[in-house]
């Protein structure tokens, strides 16, 4: 008897084989080595797109960090130099904020920390700076 997972269809097996391989490579990358020890997980955002995700403890909000070249930044060798990362704050209610790209992974992570700590303040900044957004039903 093996512990091999069972899949409901060949398509599911192909997807999870692909996803598991991508996750393994991404977690070994310089970007992954900065994010994984801090609790970030890889999320499938839909349509084959992936992002690094961190959830707020109450599960009302989460943040994503992506890299335009390959989503997870697998090919970025020096994440805190000139690499540009897209970040976003998302609410379980469907609200979201997407500020301009941020240069450097440490700065992107810091933006995410602030956004999760005070989503209402983040939304106020998004409105003031006219960032793309969809208001949250409730921001705490």
Image (cartoon, rainbow, N blue to C red):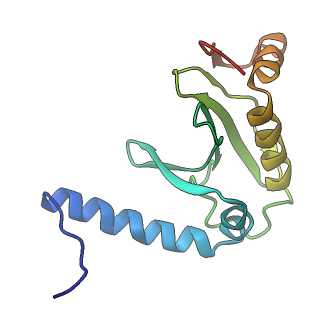
User: Where is residue 83 drawn, in percent x and y?
Assistant: 77, 55
Asked whether 122 or 108 is in front, the reply is 122
Vertical relation: 69 (above or below) 2: above
Q: Is residue 31 left or right of residue 111?
A: left
User: Where is residue 15 drawn, in percent x and y?
Assistant: 29, 59
Q: Is residue 16 left or right of residue 107?
A: left
Q: Residue at x 57, y 52 (%)?
A: 71
Can the viewer see residue 70 in this picture?
no
Vertical relation: 57 (above or below) 78: above
Q: Residue at x 61, y 66 (%)?
A: 74
Vertical relation: 45 (above or below) 125: below
Q: Is residue 8 left or right of residue 75?
A: left
Q: Image quarter for residue 6?
A: bottom left
Q: Image quarter for residue 46?
A: top left
Asked whether 43 or 92 is in front, the reply is 92
User: Where is residue 98 drawn, in percent x and y?
Assistant: 68, 28
Question: From the image, which quarter does the N terminus lie in?
Answer: bottom left
Q: In the orientation shown, which residue stands out farthest toward the bottom? A: 1
Asked whether 9 or 75 is in front, the reply is 9
């Amino acid at each position: 008897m093996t512990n091999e997972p069972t899949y409901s269809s060949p398509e599911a097996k192909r997807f999870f084989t692909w996803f598991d391989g991508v996750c393994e490579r991404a977690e070994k990358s310089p970007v992954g080595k900065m994010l994984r020890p801090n609790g970030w997980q890889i999320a499938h955002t839909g349509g084959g797109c992936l992002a690094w995700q961190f959830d707020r403890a109450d599960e009302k909000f989460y943040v994503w960090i992506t890299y335009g070249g390959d989503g997870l930044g697998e090919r970025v060798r020096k994440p805190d130099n000139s690499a540009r990362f897209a970040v976003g704050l998302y609410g379980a209610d469907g609200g979201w904020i997407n500020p301009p790209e941020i240069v450097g992974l440490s700065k992107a992570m810091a933006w995410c920390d602030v956004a999760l700590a005070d989503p209402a303040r983040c939304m106020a900044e998004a409105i003031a700076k006219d960032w793309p957004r969809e208001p949250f039903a409730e921001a705490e």
